[in-house]
Image: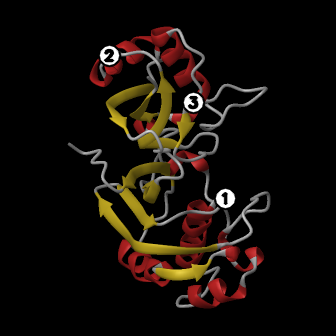
């Protein structure tokens, strides 16, 4: 009897061209498939909760696959981790309903964009945060980011190349907070467009630099024009931080 297994993992995306399988580059999905297949000796192709860009990280990433094997889900964790590289790790495994799909069953996601706000480079955050030397006013960033909360058409915050026609999304919460030298920009929504979070961050930085006037983010949203927004922030500061499903508790 086929079983549907949900794996929750985290990864450092520095060495990978995102989650999705690539014909000419190594992806996280490729490494996960290889590890699961080594354990189960089946032709597994795990379905991911999201497509992440090259260099983007995940504190919580979910994927599911169907298997005929009877190995208990919790025993898959050490078994699969044995075959995974050091920059990818499974930390939860659950058997879920047959119709569950990591992507299509997802109700919302939270992303965090991390900025290392120090005058000099910190090698411990190389490839894991955006190095940004000018002192940031996190209170200003937190005030400006509130304009994104709500149901909007986010065309202005979608890079060309995205294939989704309906660009309306709901942002449930957004904040900018400092902890020492790190400034975290956090966004929770029902879905995200191609490079949406990185463009939001780039726009906030442009507001901070005075390249975009304060209080004008609502006008940029209404413009539905990518050229009205700021730059696309680099990928290394972005983390998929939390995935939400109905009836599946990933934190226990």
224 shown above or below 53:
below
Residue in front for this viewpoint, 177 or 194: 194
Other-residue count near label 3 (Cα within 10 Å), few / some / many at <14 / 14–19 / ≥20:
many
* The N terminus - image quarter: top left
35 shown above or below 235:
above
* Secondary structure found at label 2: helix
* Residue 113 in view here: no
Image quadrant where residue 46 sits = top right
Q: Nearer the viewer, mark 1 or mark 2?
A: 2
Q: Residue furthest left?
A: 252
Name the residue tied to disc 3. 28
Name the residue tied to disc 1. 194
Total residue callouts: 3
* Secondary structure found at label 3: helix
Image quadrant where residue 209 sits = bottom right
Residue 124 in the image, given as x and y percentages of width and height = 40, 35
Colouring used for the render? secondary structure
Q: Residue at x 45, y 10 (%)?
A: 39
Residue 95 in the image, given as x and y percentages of width and height = 34, 33
Name the residue tied to disc 2. 78
Marks 3 and 2, the one that precedes in the sequence:
3
Marks 1 and 3, the one that precedes in the sequence:
3
């Amino acid at each position: 009897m086929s079983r549907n297994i949900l794996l929750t993992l985290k990864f450092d995306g520095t060495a990978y061209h995102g989650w999705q399988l690539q014909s000419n580059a190594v992806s996280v999905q490729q490494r996960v498939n290889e590890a699961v297949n080594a354990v189960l000796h089946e032709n597994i192709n795990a379905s991911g909760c999201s497509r992440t860009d090259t260099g983007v990280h995940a504190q919580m990433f979910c994927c599911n696959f169907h298997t005929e094997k009877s190995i208990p889900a919790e025993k898959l964790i050490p078994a699969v981790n044995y075959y995974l590289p050091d920059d990818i790790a499974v930390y939860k495994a659950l058997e879920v309903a047959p119709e569950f799909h990591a992507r299509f069953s997802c109700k919302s996601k939270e992303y965090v964009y991390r900025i290392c706000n120090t005058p000099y480079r910190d090698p411990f955050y190389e490839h894991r945060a955006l190095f940004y030397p000018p002192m940031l006013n996190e209170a200003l960033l937190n005030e400006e980011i509130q304009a994104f909360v709500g149901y909007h058409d986010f065309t202005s915050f979608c890079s060309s190349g995205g294939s989704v026609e309906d660009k309306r999304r709901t942002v449930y919460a957004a904040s900018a907070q400092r902890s020492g030298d790190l400034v975290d920009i956090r966004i929770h929504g029902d879905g995200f467009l191609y490079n949406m979070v990185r463009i939001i961050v780039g726009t906030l930085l442009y507001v901070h630099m005075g390249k975009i006037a304060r209080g004008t983010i609502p006008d940029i949203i209404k413009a539905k024009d990518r050229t009205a927004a700021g730059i696309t922030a680099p990928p290394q500061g972005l983390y998929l931080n939390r995935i939400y499903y109905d009836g599946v508790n990933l934190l226990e």
